[in-house]
Image: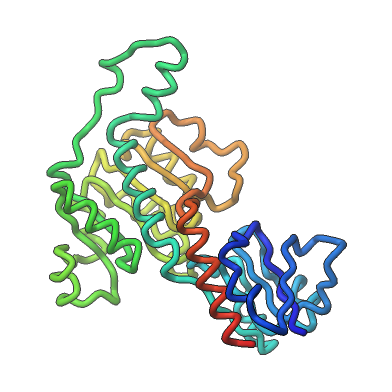
């Protein structure tokens, strides 16, 4: 009988493709649970919390496949897994809408100072003039990375009357025309947009993509969004540019180290944050669990 471990609070309803299949036993729990014999596990399902390192793989000699219930696989040592003949699968479509909606909500909240005004009012204050914001209508949104989530964000931005300028080395001009966006260079997106949202995976090439140098190329008063992966934006550089007034504000759902602890960005009033909630909807969690469970069920 094949043994599957679903870690990181995988939605049980989404595991039905495995639970209904003969010859498969599903365990729900942590890789650190003493009640689960990791040496007998054939398949592991994780979200982002569990780090699939060489050390963990050493403890799982029977492992044949790892399923990432989500898009990013930067918490998995792919090179080490591949060397051991372990297959990696993910669920690239399941949380697209949830993450795009969360990004758009963060952008709207950032531009209208909603979290700050909410906190002020809850403290018994009534400071209408202090929280004058900006419309989204007519603003130029820059999107770096036009995969599924970036494309869905572009649709929502255009519906609100925003123009959208994008950078993605893999996007064709024909596809850009279909999406109603302007395909531009990286430098032009930095220099010509009012709001910039990053939607790339975290790789060697994208780590620190927005850093001390590239942030200096942005428009004065720009707003930045990161609901993709921590580390794409150099957080220390971002804090510096917010403090000196070049960057007007930022909305962050992700950090290089999570939770971020005593981070300088958390002390800035013009920064709004959420604890990696982009995919945290009931629908997305069901979708990614179901998608990765189906992938694993076909393997066995």
Picture layout, residue 208 above or below residue 222: below
196 and 90: which one is in front? 90
Count every numbered label the image shows and give the total.
Answer: 0
- Which residue occupies 35% across, 62% down? 149
- Which residue occupies 60% across, 87% down? 299
- Residue 62: image location, x then y, percent: 78, 84
- Which residue occupies 33% across, 29% down? 113
Image quadrant where residue 53 sits: bottom right
Picture layout, residue 3 above or below residue 285: below
Image quadrant where residue 32 sits: bottom right
Horizontally, residue 202 falls left or right of residue 257, namely: left
Q: Quadrant of the C terminus?
A: bottom right
247 and 106: which one is in front? 106
Picture layout, residue 14 above or below residue 222: below
- Residue 198: image location, x then y, percent: 36, 57
Horizontally, residue 91 falls left or right of residue 175, namely: right
């Amino acid at each position: 009988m094949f043994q599957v471990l679903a870690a990181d609070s995988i939605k049980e309803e989404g595991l039905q493709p495995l639970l209904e299949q003969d010859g498969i036993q599903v365990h729900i729990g942590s890789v650190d649970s003493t009640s689960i014999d990791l040496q007998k596990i054939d398949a592991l399902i994780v979200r982002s919390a569990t780090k699939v390192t060489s050390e963990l793989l050493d403890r799982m000699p029977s492992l044949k496949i790892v399923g990432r219930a989500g898009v990013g696989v930067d918490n998995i040592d792919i090179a080490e897994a591949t060397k051991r003949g372990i297959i990696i699968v993910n669920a690239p479509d399941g949380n697209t809408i949830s993450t795009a909606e969360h990004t758009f909500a963060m952008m709207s909240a950032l531009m209208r100072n909603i979290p700050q005004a909410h906190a002020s009012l809850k403290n018994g204050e009534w400071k209408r003039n202090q929280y004058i914001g900006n419309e989204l209508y007519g603003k130029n949104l820059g999107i770096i990375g036009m995969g599924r989530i970036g494309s869905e964000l572009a649709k929502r931005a255009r519906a609100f009357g925003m123009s959208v300028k994008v950078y993605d080395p893999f996007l064709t001009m024909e596809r850009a025309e279909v999406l109603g966006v302007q395909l531009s260079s990286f430098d032009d997106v930095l220099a010509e947009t009012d709001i910039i949202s990053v939607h790339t995976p975290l790789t060697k090439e994208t780590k620190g993509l927005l850093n001390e140098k590239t942030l200096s190329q942005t428009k004065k008063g720009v707003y930045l969004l990161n609901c993709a992966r921590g580390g794409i934006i150099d957080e220390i550089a971002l804090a510096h540019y917010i403090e000196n007034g070049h960057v007007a504000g930022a909305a962050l759902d992700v950090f290089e180290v999570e939770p971020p602890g005593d981070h300088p960005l958390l002390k800035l009033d013009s920064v709004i944050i959420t604890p990696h909630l982009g995919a945290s909807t009931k629908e997305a969690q069901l979708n990614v669990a179901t998608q990765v469970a189906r992938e694993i069920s076909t393997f066995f």
